[in-house]
Image (tube, rainbow, N blue to C red):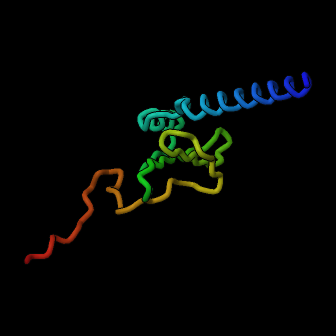
Amino acid sequence: MTTLANSSRLVSLIGAGVIAVGTMTALAPAASAQTEKEIQAGCDQANGVYDTDQDKLGNTISWCCYNDNEGKAHCDKFENGLYILTDDTRKAPPVYGPVKPPANNVPINTPPPAAH
C-alpha cells in the first residue's frame, strides 16, 4: 500500500511540475522580439536592405538582406519582431503590394483619377 501511495504522490508531483512549466512558458513574454526600429538599425549596420509589410493575418513581416564578409547573400526574415529564418537563396526582400517610390525619391507617374 505504501508503494502505491508513494507512486501516486510521485505522479502528482511530476504532473504539477509539468503544469507549472507549461504555464510559465505560456505566460512568458517573447523576450527575443525586436522592434521594427531595432531590426532596421541592425540591417543598416550590416549595410543591408530592409523591408517590412503586413501579411493577410495582420502579422508584421520584415526582411533584412545583406552580404556576409565573403560576399554571400543572406536574407533574414522576422515575424512580429521575432527572427524566423535566414534564406540564402534570396538576394533581396520580396516586393509587397504596390510599387514603392525609387530610392532617389523621384515620384512615380500615375494617371489622374477618372472624372465622374
Question: Where residue 7 appears, x then y in whole percent?
Answer: 86, 27
x, y percentage for residue 5?
85, 25
- Quarter location, residue 1: top right
Q: Total number of numbered labels?
A: 0
Q: Nearer the viewer, residue 59 or 7?
A: 7
| Left or right: 92, with 21 as reference point | left
Q: Nearer the viewer, residue 61 or 64?
A: 61
Q: Residue furthest front?
A: 1
Q: Is residue 44 above or below residue 98?
A: above
- Give coordinates of residue 3: x percent, y percent: 92, 25
Q: Nearer the viewer, residue 83 or 94?
A: 83
Whether residue 69 sits left or right of residue 9 in the image: it is left
Q: If the image is split into quadrants, where does the C terminus sit? A: bottom left
Which residue: 49% across, 58% down? 94
Quarter of the view holding residue 40: top left
Most extreme residue toward the left is 116
**At x 55% / y 29%, what residue is drawn?**
28
Residue appearing at x 24%, y 66% in the figure: 109
Q: Position of residue 86 (x, y in %)?
A: 63, 47
Q: Is residue 98 above or below residue 24?
A: below
The residue at 60%/31% (across/down) is: 23
